[in-house]
Amino acid sequence: MKKICLLLFVLITAVFSSCAAVGMDNLPAGELIKTSNSPDNQYKIEVYLCGGNATTANSVRCAAVEINSQKSRNIFWQYRQDDAEIEWLDNTNVKINGIKLNILTDSYDWRKHTSLDDDLDYWENYWDID
């Protein structure tokens, strides 16, 4: 009975630990490749390239930074990207790679906005499959 309880405890702990690591706060650091200031210069978007390896592609992480306090939060993470096109719509709204975000309240995480069809489309285009 003790072994079963211990095994259940280990499994439950592992599940909760892996779930906690999935959030926007636990993304790879990456290498800073560009910054873009808001029109009023109160905020900036920092773009980081998170390098892939043999089994994963590159991804892009963007952090919104309040310039005076240097407080930042991740607002954008997109897989299979090497760069981010940033267009400021106003002082707090931005379009990153075509996705509109309010830097104070919104975030985009590709893991929550992808489907099997997106993956299949990518690989068909990658290998030029008709």
Image (cartoon, rainbow, N blue to C red):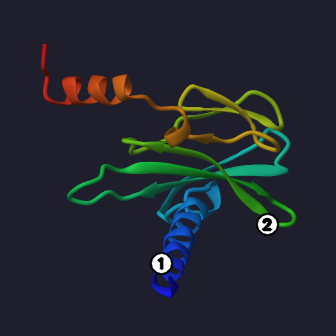
Q: Earlier in the sequence, mark 2 or mark 1?
A: 1
Q: Measuring 64% from the left and 61% from the top, which residue is drawn there?
A: 25
Q: Is residue 128 above or below residue 76?
A: above
Q: Quadrant of the C terminus?
A: top left
* Label 1: element kind: helix
Q: Report x, y in % for residue 63.
A: 65, 54
Q: CA distance from mark 2 to mark 1?
A: 48 Å
Q: Position of residue 89 (x, y in %)?
A: 75, 27
In this view, the residue in front, 19 or 108, is 19
The kind of residue on which mark 2 rests is Gln
Residue pointed to by mark 1? 4
Name which residue lies at 83% across and 37% down. 91
Q: Which residue is mark 2?
A: 70
Q: Is residue 22 above or below residue 4?
A: above
Q: Is residue 43 above or below residue 53?
A: above
Q: Position of residue 88 (x, y in %)?
A: 71, 32
Return the x and y of residue 40 as percentages of the image width and height. 85, 42
Which amino acid type corresponds to the residue marked 1 in the rendered image? Ile
Frontmost of labels 2 and 1 is 1
Within the image, what quadrant is residue 103 found in? top right
Disc 1 crowd rating (10 Å Cα; few below 14, some 14-19, many 20+) is few
* 107 relative to 10, above or below: above
49 left or right of 36 in image: left
Circles 2 and 1, Cβ within 8 Å, touching? The answer is no
